[in-house]
Image (cartoon, grey):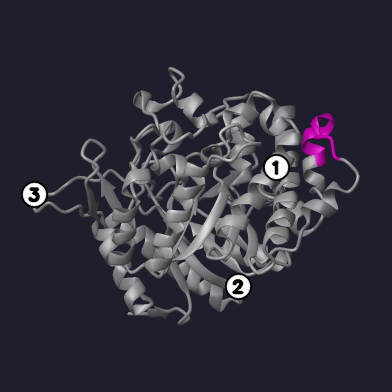
């Protein structure tokens, strides 16, 4: 049996997002977000679910932090709801909203949890969407103001700041396919959103550092390794092109200072408006980068393959392929000059049932995590500088367009009673953290 021992200071944690867990959607002066509007629109969410209550974390955060202590977490990655602090997206601060995050961070520090704060996990204030949302460049400046206020308030306790979570999802799922808020389906708009998000990231990093020069600033990108279906030249070329068009839209401008040529070729006249100085602004030097990984894309000359013979799949329909995580980490480490990496999301949705003993036995999730931890350790042995791992997710939660039908948590949430129950995967993770090692 192989044992994979991690560095003594490796940061084990878990991740959540504001709209997915907080609830209290219109309490204490919070403004409406695009996800409040989207989830209340008939036909958008499975079972007409909304995040109005979600996991009620707004009222139960002390209980959730106690769960984190039980699991032995070293870090907690969370996001703040922009509309809770700025109900209109800009202008007057809602002090009750800011006070909530002040109390939340204090509670984390009291529990010896390292806070990792994400400023934007998809819940744009609806008031800004009404003015064009991310198609309006002014939203980027409003974001920078929001970033500065949050850093000034919490930067004395929060050392690690992330501007955006998964900007490619905002770009393509929110503004190209329309499956997420704000539900737009337009190619040209989606690429303008991508560029404006990049600009907002650059402005946000500047604002964070201006507000507190001692904190760390980064961004979280979701990457799906593109791998050829066979070793045939046509499949290899197709996979390489798929990666260049779909996975480098944020990597290249942030870490190389330009948009990939393949994107120019792919979208042509629908390229966004890029102003002088934008690329230099986007390419701010970062203190860390977060990588979210769930699965890979398998590409043949005829396109993306939906099912791979012999592979296991999660409830999301995503292939379980941990070795592709290692290959992807090695690839980006060799192709970019990266700062230290944190795995900021990795996890799986499976159908959980409560057994007769009152426990949730979820061996598939445990095995998924074990495989991915091992591949991460192997990538570290390959020379990739990985400093920590945040499992998605601490809690079962509102899974966006799927509502409450998909469960990613290491802790089960009964949405009617809000009872929390640690699953077997959570107990297993606690042992990994305690021993700082994974057995193969």
- Quarter that holds the N terminus: bottom left
Residue of label 2: 384
Query: Mark 2 Cα within 10 Å, few/some/many (few <14, many 20+)?
Result: many
The image's mark for residue 67 is none
* Pointer 1 local density, CA inside 10 Å: few below 14, some 14–19, many at least 20: many
Q: Which residue occupies the foreground of this view, 84 or 300?
A: 84
Distance between the alpha carbons at the discs numbered 1 and 2 = 27 Å
Residue 99 relative to residue 175: left or right = left
Where 335 falls versus 81 (above or below)? below
Residue 197 marker? 1
Q: Name which quarter of the figure residue 192 lies in.
A: top right
Q: Which mark is residue 356?
A: 3
Which mark sits nearer the N-terminus, 2 or 3?
3
Magenta span: predominant SS is helix
Which region of the structure is painted magenta? Answer: 264-274
Mark found first going from the N terminus, 3 or 1: 1
Residue 85 lies in the magenta stretch: no
**Which residue appears at 62% of the width and 57% of the height?**
152
Q: Is residue 272 magenta?
A: yes
Q: Visible in this render: residue 440?
A: no
Q: Locate residue 301: give its quadrant.
A: top right
Q: Is residue 175 left or right of residue 253?
A: left
């Amino acid at each position: 049996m192989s044992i994979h021992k991690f560095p003594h200071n490796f940061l084990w944690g878990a991740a959540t997002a504001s709209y997915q867990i907080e609830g209290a959607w219109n309490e204490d002066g919070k403004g409406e977000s695009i996800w409040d509007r989207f989830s209340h629109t008939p036909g958008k969410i499975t079972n007409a679910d909304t995040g109005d209550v979600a996991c009620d974390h707004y009222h139960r955060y002390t209980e959730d932090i106690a769960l984190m202590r039980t699991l032995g977490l070293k870090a907690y990655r969370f996001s703040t709801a922009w509309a809770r602090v700025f109900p209109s997206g800009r202008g007057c601060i809602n002090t009750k909203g800011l006070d909530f995050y002040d109390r939340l961070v204090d509670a984390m520090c009291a529990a010896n949890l390292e806070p990792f704060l994400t400023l934007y996990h998809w819940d744009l204030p609806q008031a800004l969407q009404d003015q064009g949302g991310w198609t309006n460049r002014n939203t980027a400046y409003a974001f920078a103001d929001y970033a500065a206020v949050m850093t000034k308030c919490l930067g004395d306790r929060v050392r690690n700041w992330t501007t955006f979570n998964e900007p490619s999802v905002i770009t393509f799922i929110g503004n190209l396919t329309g499956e997420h808020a704000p539900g737009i389906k337009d190619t040209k708009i989606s690429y303008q959103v991508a560029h404006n998000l990049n600009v907002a990231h650059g402005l946000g990093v500047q604002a964070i550092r201006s507000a507190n020069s001692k904190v760390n600033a980064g961004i979280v990108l979701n990457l799906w390794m593109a791998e050829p279906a066979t070793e045939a030249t046509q499949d290899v070329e197709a996979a390489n092109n798929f990666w260049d068009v779909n996975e480098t839209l944020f990597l290249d401008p942030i870490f190389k200072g330009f948009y990939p040529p393949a994107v120019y070729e792919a979208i042509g006249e629908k390229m966004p408006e890029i102003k002088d100085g934008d690329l230099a602004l986007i390419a701010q030097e970062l203190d860390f980068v977060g990588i979210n990984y769930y699965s890979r894309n398998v590409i043949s000359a005829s396109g993306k393959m939906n099912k791979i013979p012999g592979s296991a799949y999660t409830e999301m329909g995503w292939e379980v392929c941990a070795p592709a995580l290692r290959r992807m980490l090695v690839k980006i480490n060799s192709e970019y000059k990266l700062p230290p990496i944190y795995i900021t999301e990795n996890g799986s949705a499976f159908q959980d049932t409560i057994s007769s003993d009152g426990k949730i036995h979820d061996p598939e999730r445990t095995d998924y995590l074990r495989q991915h931890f091992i591949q991460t350790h192997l990538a570290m042995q390959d020379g990739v500088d990985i400093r920590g791992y945040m499992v998605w997710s601490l809690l079962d939660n509102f899974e966006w367009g799927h509502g409450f039908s998909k469960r990613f948590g290491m802790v089960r949430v009964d949405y009617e009673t809000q009872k929390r129950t640690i699953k077997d995967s959570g107990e297993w993770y606690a042992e990994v953290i305690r021993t700082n090692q994974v057995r193969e």
